[in-house]
Amino acid sequence: MSRVRTFIAVDVGEAIVEKAVALQSQLAHCGAEVKWVSAEAMHVTLLFLGEVEDRDIVRVCRTVQKAASQMPEFSLRVGGVGAFPNPRRPKVVWAGITNGADELRALFKLIEEPMLEMGVYRQEERDYTPHLTLGRMRGEADGQLIAAELPKHIAWDGGRTIASEVLVMSSDLRKAGPEYAVMGRSKLAHGEV
């Protein structure tokens, strides 16, 4: 039985992606070696499921569809920058979610429980923190270069979009970076639910 590396995400739209790519260019001027996320790969991850058996993908998509139908569309604004585990020792550089974070957390909760019940998701130890990953550090010295650069972009505004669907995605790891494909689209409800 074959398996598919799977995750569940929300698209942020082209306008935000363009601004995020411009921000990556500004951050890159500090000289740190960072593996920047490509424009095509930018999204807000809700849950990373890992390797899911082929036969479970349809059930995953149906479960996401049911959860999405319980949640109304919402405004999503991306802004500010930070790093995990913290800005002083960055490993992952991200843009924050300034509006829509509560809705993303609610959506995460709607999807997490059924995925745990299906046995296709292992609960993470840390709380879910909605963010847009910009890049991953290659070395500790590079982290210090980025750490000095982040405060200059704290007020960065990536723009706003309407979150209207949840995507079930596959991730095929390649030398050039992961290649993503949409396996399922689930519309959020229009208006109040």
Image (tube, grey):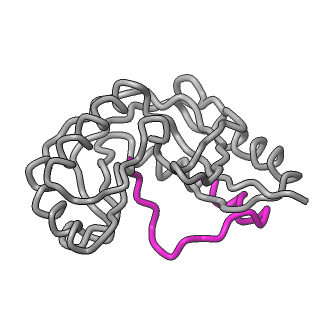
- The structure residue drawn at horizontal position 46% and vertical position 45%, both measured from the top left corner, is 44
Direction from residue 70 to residue 20 in the image, left or right: left
Direction from residue 104 to residue 117 in the image, left or right: right
Nearer to us in this view, 103 or 46 = 46
Q: Which residues are magenta?
A: 110-132
Residue 55's spot in the image, x, y percent?
A: 89, 52
Q: Quadrant of the N terminus?
A: bottom right
Residue lying farthest front? 175
Q: Is residue 123 above or below residue 107?
A: below
Q: Is residue 87 above or below residue 61?
A: below
- The structure residue drawn at horizontal position 34% and vertical position 66%, both measured from the top left corner, is 138
Nearer to us in this view, 134 or 103 = 134
Rendering quarter of residue 83: bottom left
Direction from residue 169 to residue 15 in the image, left or right: left
Question: Is 79 colored magenta in this rendering?
Answer: no
Q: How many marks?
A: 0
Rendering quarter of residue 146: bottom left
Residue 106's spot in the image, x, y percent?
A: 51, 50
- The structure residue drawn at horizontal position 59% and vertical position 44%, both measured from the top left corner, is 179
Residue 165's spot in the image, x, y percent?
A: 58, 32
Q: Quadrant of the C terminus?
A: top right
Residue 187's spot in the image, x, y percent?
A: 63, 29
Rendering quarter of residue 5: bottom right
